[in-house]
Amino acid sequence: MSFEAVIGLEVHAQLLTRSKLFCGCATAFGASPNVHTCEVCLGMPGALPVLNREAVTLAVRAALALDCTVHERSQWARKNYFYPDLPKGYQISQFDRPLATHGHLDLEVEGSARTIDILRIHMEEDAGKNVHDDVLAGSRSYVDFNRGGVPLIEIVGAPQIRSGAEAAAYMRELRRTLRFLDVCDGNLEEGSLRCDANVSIRKVGATTLGTRTELKNINSFRFVAAAIDFEIHRQIAVVEAGDAVVQETRLWDAQAKVTRAMRSKEEAHDYRYFPDPDLPDLVLTAAAIHSARATLPELPAAKKERFVDALGLTAYDAALLTEEPELCRFFEAAVAGHKNAKGIANWILNELLREARGQPLAALKLTPESLAELVRLIDDGTISGKIAKDLFAELVTAGGAPAALVKERGLAQLVDTAGIEATVDAVLAANAGSVAAYRAGKTNILGFLVGQVMKASGGKANPKIVNEVLRRRLG
Ligand SMILES: [Zn+2]
């Protein structure tokens, strides 16, 4: 019997605001526990929520970029459940009237194009974090409410994904899009982007859905693929053994590489949703939605296409440059200063990434403007590639203006033929054996002689002229 998997992803993305969704507490990650809290996000009686406008702006931007219909009126709802990390006993979310519906995300999976529909995007506040300490005597548990009330969007994808690899590609593309929009920092380790996967299997050709399990809080591309693939195989084994898949929430155990049952899965009616009486409907004017759409930045997929079509980059280089917003911005700023896009792309992808050694580009002294200037100096023949490389390493660590440095240190290429001829003659005199070998037919020794002349000139001789002079002298 052959089965297919049906996978739907719910991705939670933390919006890049400085303060929480309904109070002024900071959203900064990594503070001491419970520092960023107040009566609102701790759910004190009588404290009232006030909506963060910037969070709405970011949520709308994400929804429009994913081609969703953004609704002029949406509604806040209380999602009731009792967990220590939820001080109010409910989470403010959106339920039957979400912010946005009916979008899609285009992605590439192993070279072929796929479109996954997005059913809805709603806004909600994050819960706190339970910290279980089994080491201390008494096995205490603690709650850190710093994260409680941080603004999230939940992006609910249609159950159109068929494999772990597709799920990972979807999550990657979503992350890339949200990062280019400046909506979410996409930091998986800090939980800024995490994913729940609903997984079920059915016989190929069946139209009804099988019983699904939910894999909770997966925060790595590798784990999302591994957890889903494990779960698909587990469910097939259950069905083939004549048993039924149980609807439940399961956790991925990254060490053992298995999913484990955590609890029976809640249904929507378990949460007793109802409209939050503390908050009016979220109302957006058509004009505001229109202007948000008009100011959407160019998305990475469109940038990639433009880099190939208009700038002449290879698809491979264009893909690398549109993976990270920071890298892409550096490239575009450099190309704005000097039109040799291919040259600049090469310097960034080869030299810059190596010199950066994983540091953020903003930490380097090299600016896009100075890279543009450096490539211009090469292109107009002022400096040799060798000098440029030496200078580049210095620009990365110490900064400076390439043209001024070249002038100050006399690094400009030697194009004066008479001077080069003198150097060539000196090199030939010192390498009589090589000259004899060349004349005896070992013409590949020319490269060695070119190298010697370049070395004697301190890397400054124009290699083209060196070649010409050498051939003339030897021939
Ligand atoms: Zn607060």
Image (cartoon, rainbow, N blue to C red):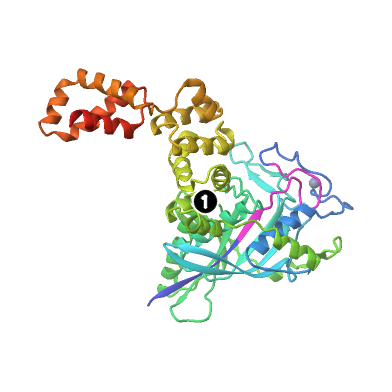
239 or 428: nearer the viewer:
428
**Which residue carries the number 1 mark?**
323
Residue occupying the point 47% across, 63% down: 108
Residue 41 lies left or right of residue 223; in this view the side is right
Q: Quadrant of the C terminus?
A: top left
Q: Where's residue 363, x and y in %?
A: 58, 33
219 or 135: nearer the viewer:
219
Residue occupying the point 71% across, 50% down: 85
Looking at numbered disc 1 in the image, what kind of residue is underneath it? Glu
**Relative to residue 447, is residue 48 depicted above or below?**
below
Kindly report the secondary structure that dominates the magenta region of the rendered protein.
loop
Q: Where's residue 263, x and y in %?
A: 59, 61
Q: Quadrant of residue 4?
A: bottom left
Q: Quadrant of the N terminus?
A: bottom left
Q: Quadrant of residue 418?
A: top left
At label 1, counting other C-alpha atoms closer than 10 Å, the crowd grade (few under 14, some 14-19, many 20 or more) is many
Stretch in magenta: 11-28
Residue 272 lies left or right of residue 110; in this view the side is right
Residue 51 lies left or right of residue 230; in this view the side is right
Q: Describe the element under mark 1 as helix, strand or loop.
A: loop
